[in-house]
Image: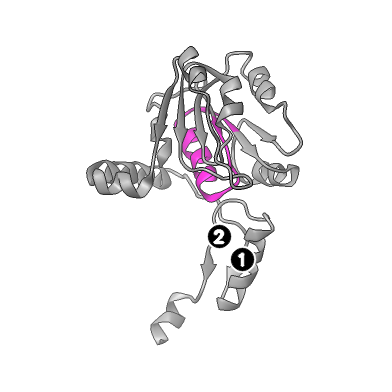
Amino acid sequence: MQCTYLDDNSDDRCASKVSGASGGLGSVCCAVAKKLGAKVIALVGTQSKAEQLRRYIDVDLVIATEGNDNWPQQILDFTNGRGLDVVLDNTGVVNKALKAIADFGRVVLLGFVAREGVMEEVAMHKLLLKSLQVTGYDYWKNGKRDPQELQRIWDGYVDMIRCGLRPVLSGRYEGLEDISKAMRDLKDRKVVGKIVVKIADEKETAKL
C-alpha cells in the first residue's frame, strides 16, 4: 500500500528499487509497483532468496546483496545510467541506494533495521546535491492522523486485488502444530512473502 508514493501514471520509464523484497511488505511493494507500471528492481539478501523471488513475483531485476557491494552499479547498468526514480527502503540501505538514484528522485522509508545495534545514518548533503525528496511512512501513525487517506489506500489496494493482484504466501501451514514450523522457517530465512497458518476450515470452526 505504501507504493502509492509512486505516481498513478507510472510507466516503464519509472524505475523503483525495493529493499527487503522477499519479505511480506517488500513483496507487496514489488507487486503494487509493477501493477502501477513501474520497472521494479528487487533487492534480497541471498541467492537462494533471489531464486525464490524470481519464481513467485513478477519483477524486472532481482539482485542478491550478500557479498555483493557492486549492486548500485548493477542498478545503474540496468537503467542505462539513468538511475532510480523511487527507492522504497525498509532495511536500512539508503546510503548505498543513493549511489544509484536519479536526480529529483524519491526515497520512501517504510522501516529500518539496526545492524549490530547501529541505525543507518544518511549524509544529508547527498540528498541536497541530487535534489531528492525523502518521506517516512508509518502505517499506524498515519492511519490515526488521517483515517480518510488510509481508507483511500486500502480501497486502491482492494481494487488491485480484484483486478488480479495476489500477495505472495509462503509454504503451506495447517493446524496449531505447524506454528512452530512456520516460526522456524521465518527464523531460518526460508520465507518469501507472508506466512499464513490455516487453523481450521469453516465447517470445523462452526462445530466449535
- The picture places residue 25, in percent across and down from the top left corner, at 50, 46
Q: Residue at x 45, y 19 (%)?
A: 132
Q: Residue at x 64, y 18 (%)?
A: 76
- The picture places residue 45, in percent across and down from the top left corner, at 68, 42
Instruction: Report the front residue among 112 and 62.
Output: 112
Q: Residue at x 51, y 29 (%)?
A: 87
Instruction: Report the front residue among 77 and 52.
Output: 77
The answer to whether residue 183 is left or right of residue 86 is right
| CB contact under 8 Å: marks 2 and 1 | yes
- The picture places residue 108, in percent across and down from the top left corner, at 45, 32
Which numbered dot is residue 170?
Answer: none
Which amino acid is tagged 1? Answer: Ala
Task: Identify the mark nearer the N-term, 2 or 1.
Answer: 1
Q: Which residue is mark 1?
A: 182
Dot 1 surroundings within 10 Å: few (below 14), some, or many (20 or more)? many
Q: Which residue is mark 2?
A: 195
State which region is magenta: 17-41
Residue 13 seen in the figure: no
